[in-house]
Amino acid sequence: MSLKNLGVALLSTLAITATAQEYPNRDILGVVMWGAGGATDVVARAINPHAEAELGQSIVVQNRPGGAGAISTTFVNATPADGYTLLYGAENPQLHPVMGISSLDYSNFYPVAILGLGTGVIVVPADSEYETMQDLLDAIAANPGRLNMGSTGPGGIPGTISAMISNVTEFDINPIQFGGEGPGITAMLGGEVDFMPAGVSAAAGQIEAGTVRALAVVDTEPMATLPGVPAITDTLPDMAKFLPWGPFYGVFIKNDSPDEVKARLTEAFKNAAEQPEFRTLMEARGNIMMNISGDEAREFLNTWQSVTAWAMWDTGGAEVDPESLGIPRP
């Protein structure tokens, strides 16, 4: 290498290092993959002020819903790898490859933080004839393909929980797709669907108001915040092989962002997630605090993808064989 080229390379390296050390020196964009008011949006806006205090810069939240999260992941993936565009994401991208939605999943991003893990719940209108999970299963068995289930499309919480249930028992239902869990629950209250699997965070308000009834928590243990609601394994013990499972909420940047930027963001969000106000909100909405990053977060993401992708493939809910994508069977 000539002295001139060596000098240019050295100056470039110094410039990158200086930029990373000064990071952040301007506003950051935080892209939320679901619409305003949804569970992911609520978590993003709750962590945001604490992260801003840690970073000393504003994080401008922008909602870019669509394609079950594919619109936002594609957008963030197309931005510079400089840490100035964050992805506030949920679990959906981990299923995009097997659903044939997109080739992008979280292997394309660095997990700054997996903030928390949600829990699923099976809900019906408060005046429903189905008093227990067994009542619902009996009705589905007696009327194959006739009960309407609220859904949010491929890779969503309702569809994934449905795939898991189908893996352990007959579960021939008619899924009706809505633009989110909130609209789906509203439609259920209007009589458009008979029941809906949903995240506790999305259903908690209606459960508390007494307009919907929870038949089961999609876990191996009941939840303290939902007294009297049994675990789904009480009715379907074979579901235990998929659990604990649930929606999760995280913060991501592009994989090839500078190490210094990754470290700065990881520290900021780790401290932000420890703030009592944020922890209280997460726990009140039925979430399990995780606050993990880096290799630990990557291991969690891989395990979640493996369990879920294969559950969907085994029940005919996936378009692409997970094995062909290098996703190991759990």
Image (cartoon, grey):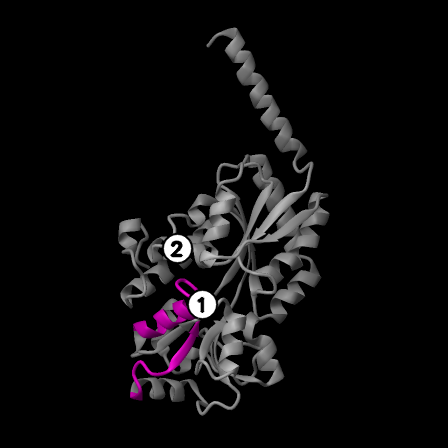
Q: What residue type is labelled 2?
A: His
**Position of the C terminus by quadrant:** bottom left
Q: Is residue 163 left or right of residue 289?
A: left
Q: In this view, does 250 lie to the left or right of 306?
A: right
Residue under numbered circle 1? 152
Q: Residue 300 carries which label?
A: none
Q: Which stretch appears magenta?
A: 142-167
**Residue 126 in the image: x percent, y percent?**
53, 88
Q: Marks 2 and 1, Cα distance to the nearest angstrom? A: 14 Å
Of badges 2 and 1, the one in the foreground is 1
Q: In this view, does 183 lie to the left or right of 165?
A: right
Secondary structure under badge 2? helix
Task: Name the foreground residue: 103 vs 50.
Answer: 103
Residue under numbered circle 2? 96
Q: Which residue is drawn at 65% across and 47% down?
A: 268
Does residue 260 sit above or below 18 in this rendering?
A: below
Task: Name the foreground residue: 37 vs 227.
Answer: 37
Asked if residue 155 is among those painted magenta in the image, a careful observer would answer yes
